[in-house]
Amino acid sequence: MAGNSFGTLFKLSSFGESHGVAIGGVIDGCPAGLEIDLLFIQSELDRRKPGQSHITTQRKESDTVEFLSGIFEGKTTGAPIGFVIKNEDQKPKDYVHLKDTFRPSHADFTYEHKYGLRDYRGGGRSSARETACRIVAGAIAKLFLKKQNISVNAFVKQVGEIKLEKTFTDLDLSKIESSIVRCPDETTSSKMISYIEEIKKQGDTVGGVIQCVIQNAPIGLGEPVFDKLHAVLGHAMLNINAVKGFEIGSGFDSVHYKGSELNDLFVASENKNAAIQTKTNNSGGIQGGISNGMPIYFNVAFKPVATIMQKQASVNKQGEAVELEGKGRHDPCVLPRAVPIVESMAALVIADFLLLARCNRV
């Protein structure tokens, strides 16, 4: 099975299955001498872990990370950083009934066809449990970015048809964690929570949109042809479970405007770190695939979780018609727990491009 690594210089390779002994990874390319804040890393994992509120899955995992290498006396050594997270609340019996059956909109059928077998316990390798590994790597990337004064913040912008109409510039992003749905606007947050509660009672699921904002990224990140910054960010986001869409800046709304209306005009900068900025930021902080010094922002669309507590028609390995109903513990809406995953993948991309930028000039 290929495709288990992400990044060029700052690289994560992950391993493990949903109901196996453990998940974990190896982070390669992290510069030596970076101070590692273990409490911060664990707090990031706590933002993603199951059972954190009544609108998330009730699987009980502490998601405690154990580092095996690459850290000495509280600092990175430059060597590969190995880590594991034990799976403590395994319930593979919840999935025995799926051994020979394909769940609608899951990876069951494609994995079976591609590899000739699959781990049916919670989806095995295809499970979103693997994303805890990305949180660990992303937290270390965030510590690296913090030294450069770069911040990465994501929040829930939409759940179903309930949409936060304010732009990120009008929001207090420090309020993201005060909401269990991770929406920084109190009124919209309450509506979202009520809707998710209603959906959960119906045994159904709902999707939505997460917006991510990267502030203080320097000018010049990204490569102009096949490794455009927004292209790699899109690659990172579309590798997250349940993601079905990505747009940078004005995104799909761009088609409604003329060039004279959408162009970001250059003006003298109000920022002491740059002489020039753009009057508007419809480009989302990236032009020609390269960061221009403005805030980078993008939207990530998540589909409803595929496992629902309702009966659905499907087929088994023999192609015979069967009827399925979800069992076990699942999120009615994945967005609240996906916020730190989006941040982590964004942080990995920016950290990688910061290191690559060092190679571009003498």
Image (tube, rainbow, N blue to C red):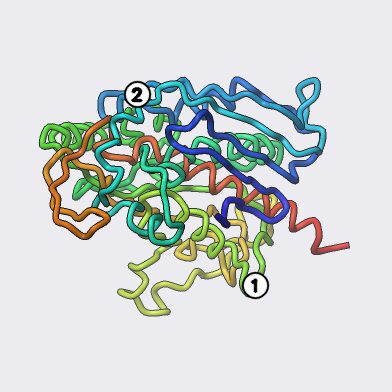
Query: Which label's residue is closer to the chain start, 2 or 1?
Result: 2
**Vertical comparison of 71 with 152: above or below:** above
Q: Tell whether 147 sits left or right of 94.
A: right
Identified by mark 1, the residue type is: Pro
Q: Which residue is nearer to you in this view: 110 or 63?
A: 110
**Real-space CA distance between mark 2 and mark 1, rounded to the nearest whole angstrom:** 43 Å
Q: Which residue is nearer to you in this view: 4 or 289?
A: 4
Residue located at (28% from left, 45% from top): 305
In the picture of the structure, the residue carrying the numbered disc 2 is: 51
Q: Which numbered disc covers residue 43?
A: none
On the rendered image, what quadrant is the N terminus found in? bottom right
| Mark 2 vs mark 1: in front | 2
In the picture of the structure, the residue carrying the numbered disc 1 is: 224
Specify few, some or many for label 1: CA neighbours under 10 Å numbering under 14, 14-19, or 20 or more.
few
**Vertical comparison of 329 with 218: above or below:** above
**Vertical comparison of 219 with 214: above or below:** below
Secondary element type, mark 2: loop
* Residue 93: percent from left, percent from top: 31, 29
Residue located at (66% from left, 41% from top): 145
Residue located at (25% from left, 49% from top): 101
* Residue 45: percent from left, percent from top: 50, 28
Identified by mark 2, the residue type is: Gly
* Residue 251: percent from left, percent from top: 39, 65
* Residue 222: percent from left, percent from top: 65, 63
Q: Residue furthest right?
A: 362
